[in-house]
Image (tube, grey):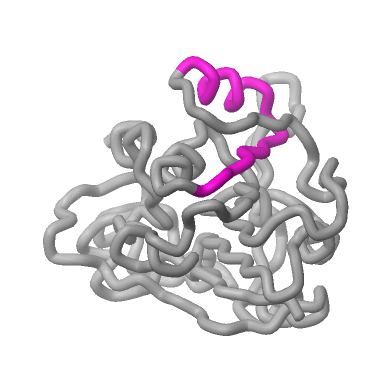
Amino acid sequence: MEHGTFLGDDRFVWSPEGLDEVEAELLGPPEELKGKDVLELGAGAGQCSRWLAGQGARPVALDISHRQLQHALRIGGPFPLVCADAGALPFADGSFDLACSAYGALPFVADPRLVLREVRRVLRPGGRLVFSVTHPIRWAFPDEPGPEGLSVSSSYFDRTPYVEQDEEGRAVYVEHHRTLGDRVRDVVASGFRLMDLVEPEWPAWNTSAWGGWSPLRGNLIPGTAIFVCERD
């Protein structure tokens, strides 16, 4: 299944399990999103921001990848696109009511606390941040959807980043592993309260395999961790 096909152009999907914000309401009831200023980090093609705009929110879609934002621009949407580093947000203090990231930004930075502190800075008092990442336990298993992906192959505590390189040896993809405890400590140390930690279960309706995600694995081990945080 292609990435874009799975997400659609205007759905807010938190994870490959198919957890949709329409049902999850992790940002709050949809009717309460109207008029809210929302920052989406690692927005990619802007699917989540497009859905938020449809609820009457005022999203800003931020991504460090110009190519991703070009794709978002081609699809279109009534919200600004910002190409910037999540660790140096180009916004004034207290600019947003909510911030969100569905598998964007945080897994790809070496210093997540820098990003979290920046998000806290641009949130208004009582503002909420919700972000999803690959569940840390998955790092101990091969990234395979079949039976071969059910046997532990490496240490859960090995924090060595996963790196893909091009033919010239340049890193083209880097994802950083942090344990569940690391993530919790990052949230708290950055001035947030952890309100909930959601581990989506694999739904019966989802019969698709996508990358290392599949019904077989999803019914046995969690694939996604979603952190619901609030600032003072």
At horizontal 56% and vertical 74% (from top left) the residue drawn is 228
At horizontal 51% and vertical 48% (from top left) the residue drawn is 57
- Single out the residue that lies furthest toward the top: 74
At horizontal 61% and vertical 52% (from top left) the residue drawn is 38
Which quarter of the image is occupied by the N terminus?
Answer: top left
Residue 113 x, y percent position in the rendering: 81, 66
Residue 99 lies in magenta, yes or no?
A: no
Location of residue 228 with respect to 70 vertically, above or below: below
Residue 109 in view: yes
* Residue range corresponding to the magenta coloring: 57-74
Location of residue 178 with respect to 144 vertically, above or below: below
Residue 214 vs residue 10, the one in the foreground: 10
Residue 43 x, y percent position in the rendering: 57, 40
Residue 215 vs residue 101, the one in the foreground: 101
Which quarter of the image is occupied by the C terminus?
Answer: bottom right
Dividing the picture into quadrants, the one containing residue 141 is bottom left
Residue 221 x, y percent position in the rendering: 35, 74
Q: Is residue 132 left or right of residue 107?
A: left
Residue 65 lies in magenta, yes or no?
A: yes
Residue 186 vs residue 128, the one in the foreground: 128
Dividing the picture into quadrants, the one containing residue 148 is bottom left
Residue 162 in view: no
Q: How many marks?
A: 0
Residue 161 vs residue 188, the one in the foreground: 188
Residue 139 x, y percent position in the rendering: 53, 64
Dividing the picture into quadrants, the one containing residue 142 is bottom left
At horizontal 47% and vertical 41% (from top left) the residue drawn is 53
Location of residue 189 with respect to 142 vertically, above or below: below
